[in-house]
Image (spheres, grey):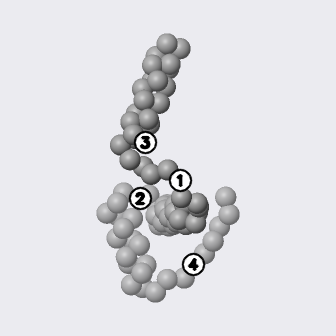
Amino acid sequence: MSTMNISLPDTLKAFVDEQVHQRGYGTSSEYVRELIRKDQDRLQLRGLLLAGAESAPSSPADASYFEGLRSRVRKGVKAGARG
């Protein structure tokens, strides 16, 4: 694992220390790693949303679409129960 040192103003350092204490993190590094992971997830979701917004329209998601999804899930559950 690599090491990274960061400098924080006293107010941010106090905030991080409080979050570590209140949320049960062992260290400030654990807290910062969690923030970075959440930011990665947010960026990935944003990319997926943008890709979806830029994609060509498909068939509408109406009642028959969702019934088809339910049917596929039911078939998958039944097939898994046999195995």
Q: Tell me what residue is drawn at x 50 percent, y 19 percent.
A: 79
Q: Name the residue under label 4.
A: 6
Q: How far apart are marks 3 and 2 (CA)?
A: 44 Å
Question: Looking at numbered disc 3 in the image, what kind of residue is underneath it?
Answer: Tyr
Q: Earlier in the sequence, mark 3 or mark 2?
A: 2
Kind of element beneath mark 1: loop
Viewer-side label of 1, 4: 1
Kind of element beneath mark 4: loop
Viewer-side label of 1, 2: 1
Quadrant of residue 5 within the rendered picture? bottom right
Q: Mark 3 points at which residue?
A: 65
Badge 1: residue crowd in 10 Å (few <14, some 14–19, many ≥20): few
Q: How far apart are marks 1 and 3 (CA)?
A: 11 Å
Q: Earlier in the sequence, mark 1 or mark 3?
A: 1
Q: Distance between the residues labelled 2 and 4?
A: 18 Å
Badge 2: residue crowd in 10 Å (few <14, some 14–19, many ≥20): some
Residue 29 visible somewhere in the drawing: no
Number of the label disc, if any, that sits on residue 58 = 1
Q: Mark 2–mark 4 contact, CB under 8 Å? A: no
Q: Tell me what residue is drawn at x 42 percent, y 81 percent.
A: 12
